[in-house]
Image: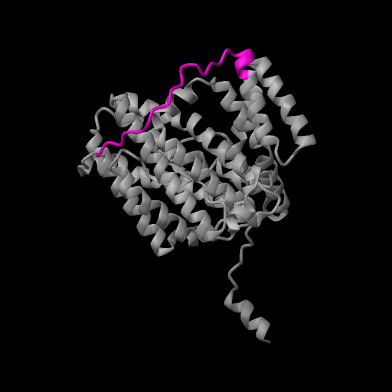
C-alpha cells in the first residue's frame, strides 16, 4: 500500500529512462562480446534475459527492503573484458568464471570489507570521482552537434524548455520529443520491431585456472572498483547512508543462478543510478525508492521480451541515446561538482580526482574511476592531511621543565 501511495510519474520515468540507457548503451558492449564468441541469436537472447532478470530481482528486492533507490545492472567494465577473451575462452569457461567472481564479491560483501573502504574516502574525492564519470556523458551532448545537428539542437531546446516549465516531468517529455525528432531528422523507424519472447538456455559451467586468472579475478576487481565503488558513492552523495554489505551480498547471490544462463555479474549501476537518486526522480528523497522498483519492473519486461529488445533499441540512432543520457545527467553532474567544491579543505585533491576520472584512463586493466580515487586520495594525504612532526626527546624534557 505504501508503494502505491508513493508512486508517481516522475519515479516511473526515471526508472524507465535508466533501463533505456542501459539497454541502448552498455548493451552494445554485450553485443560485441557475443559477436566475438560467435554465439547464436537465441543464445544472445538468453544472455539479455539473464542480465535483465538479475538486475530486476536485485533492484526490486533491495529498493523495497532498504527503502532507497538501489539501481542494479550488469557489469559493463566486466563485459568489456569478454571482448578480448572470446573466442579463445569457451562459453562454459566464462560461466564458471562468472560464478567464481560472484563468490569473491559475496565474501567481500558479507565480511563488510567494502564498507570500511568507503568510509576512508573523503567526501570531496567521492563527489569529484562521480562528476568525472558523468562528465563524458555531458560532453556527448555537444559532440553530437557534429553528427546530428538538428536532433541535438532540438533535444537541447526541449531540455531547456521542459526543465523550466515542468522540471518534475521533464524526462518523460524529453524522451517523447527525442523519439519524434529521431524519426523526423534521423530517419529512425520502428517498423522492423516485432514481439519475441525470451528462450533461456542453460549453460554447463567449467572451471579452469586460465579462466579464473584471465576473467574471474579481473571481473571481480573491475566490478568492485568500476561499479560498486561509484555506485555506492552516488547513493552516499544523494544522502542515503545505506551500508554496502546487503547490496553486495544480494547482488552476488542473484548473480550465481543467472550465470548459468549466460548472465555476467550483477552489480550496482554507476551511471544510470544517478537518474533515480536525484531530485528529478522525486523531490522527496524518501519516495525515490519507487524509481528503483520501477527500474526493476522495466527490466522484468525487458527480460520477457529480450528478443525484441535487440530490434527495438538498435532501431534508434546512437546519437539519440547519447543525447538523452547526457541531458538527463546534467543535474547529477551539477550536484556532484557542487559537493566537491563545497569541501574547500581538500579542493585541490578533488580537482585532481575529477581530472583523472574524466580522462578515461585505463592502467593494468583498472578503469579511471579506480585510479581517480587512488590518485586523488594520495593527493589528499600529501597536500591536505596534517603531518605530525616527531617530538624530540630533548624537547619533551624542556616542556616538562
- Percent position (x, y) of residue 73? 46, 42
Tell me the colour scheme of the image.
Answer: one colour
Q: Principal SS element in the magenta part? A: loop
Q: Is residue 115 left or right of residue 344?
A: left
Region in magenta? 182-202
Residue furthest bottom as drawn: 401
- Percent position (x, y) of residue 368? 51, 39
Question: Residue at 40% of width from left, 36% of height from top?
Answer: 304
Residue furthest right as drawn: 165
User: Is residue 192 in the magenta section?
Assistant: yes
User: Is residue 246 in the magenta section?
Assistant: no
Where is 104 relative to 111, above or below? above
Of residue 207 and residue 23, the one placed in the foreground of this image is 23
Question: Residue at 60% of width from left, 32% of height from top?
Answer: 325
* Residue 383 shows up from this direction: no
Where is 368 relative to 38, above or below? below
Residue 45: quadrant of the picture:
top left
* Number of numbered labels in the structure image: 0
Question: Residue at 31% of width from left, 48% of height from top?
Answer: 257
Q: Is residue 28 left or right of residue 255?
A: right
Question: Residue at 68% of width from left, 87% of height from top?
Answer: 401
Of residue 285 and residue 388, the one placed in the foreground of this image is 285
Classify the position of the N terminus by image quarter. Answer: bottom right
- Percent position (x, y) of residue 232? 53, 52
* Residue 192 shows up from this direction: yes
- Percent position (x, y) of residue 140? 61, 27
Amino acid at each position: 500500500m505504501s508503494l502505491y501511495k508513493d508512486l508517481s510519474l516522475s519515479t516511473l520515468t526515471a526508472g524507465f529512462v535508466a533501463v533505456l540507457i542501459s539497454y541502448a548503451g552498455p548493451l552494445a558492449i554485450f553485443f560485441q562480446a557475443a559477436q566475438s564468441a560467435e554465439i547464436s541469436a537465441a543464445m544472445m537472447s538468453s544472455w539479455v534475459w539473464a542480465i535483465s532478470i538479475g538486475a530486476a530481482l536485485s533492484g526490486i528486492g533491495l529498493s523495497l527492503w532498504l527503502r532507497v533507490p538501489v539501481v542494479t545492472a550488469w557489469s559493463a567494465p566486466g563485459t568489456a573484458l569478454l571482448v578480448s577473451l572470446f573466442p579463445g575462452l569457451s562459453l562454459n569457461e566464462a560461466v564458471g568464471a562468472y560464478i567464481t567472481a560472484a563468490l569473491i564479491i559475496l565474501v567481500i560483501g558479507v565480511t563488510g570489507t567494502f564498507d570500511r573502504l568507503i568510509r576512508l574516502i573523503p567526501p570531496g574525492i567521492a563527489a569529484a570521482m562521480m562528476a568525472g564519470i558523468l562528465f563524458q556523458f555531458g560532453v556527448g551532448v555537444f559532440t553530437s552537434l557534429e553528427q546530428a545537428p538538428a536532433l541535438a539542437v532540438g533535444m537541447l531546446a526541449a531540455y531547456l524548455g521542459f526543465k523550466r516549465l515542468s522540471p518534475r516531468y521533464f524526462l518523460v517529455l524529453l524522451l517523447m520529443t527525442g523519439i519524434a525528432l529521431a524519426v523526423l531528422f534521423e530517419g529512425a523507424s520502428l517498423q522492423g520491431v516485432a514481439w519475441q519472447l525470451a528462450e533461456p538456455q542453460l549453460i554447463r559451467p567449467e572451471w579452469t585456472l586460465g579462466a579464473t586468472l584471465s576473467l574471474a579475478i579481473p571481473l571481480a576487481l573491475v566490478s568492485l572498483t568500476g561499479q560498486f565503488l561509484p555506485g555506492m558513492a552516488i547513493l552516499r552523495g544523494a544522502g542515503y547512508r545505506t551500508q554496502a554489505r546487503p547490496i553486495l551480498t544480494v547482488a552476488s547471490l542473484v548473480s550465481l543462478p543467472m550465470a548459468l544462463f549466460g548472465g555476467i555479474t550483477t552489480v550496482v549501476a554507476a551511471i544510470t543510478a544517478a537518474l533515480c537518486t536525484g531530485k528529478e526522480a522525486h523531490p522527496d528523497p524518501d519516495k525515490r525508492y519507487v524509481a528503483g522498483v520501477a527500474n526493476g519492473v522495466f527490466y522484468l519486461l525487458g527480460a520477457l521480451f529480450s528478443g525484441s529488445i535487440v530490434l527495438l533499441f538498435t532501431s534508434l540512432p546512437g546519437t539519440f541515446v547519447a543525447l538523452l543520457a547526457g541531458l538527463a545527467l546534467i543535474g547529477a553532474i551539477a550536484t556532484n561538482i557542487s559537493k566537491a567544491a563545497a569541501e574547500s579543505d581538500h579542493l585541490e585533491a578533488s580537482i585532481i580526482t575529477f581530472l583523472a576520472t574524466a580522462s578515461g584512463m585505463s592502467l593494468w586493466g583498472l578503469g579511471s574511476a579506480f585510479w581517480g580515487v587512488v590518485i586523488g586520495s594520495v593527493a589528499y594525504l600529501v597536500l591536505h592531511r596534517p603531518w605530525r612532526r616527531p617530538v624530540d626527546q630533548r624537547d619533551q624534557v624542556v616542556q616538562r621543565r
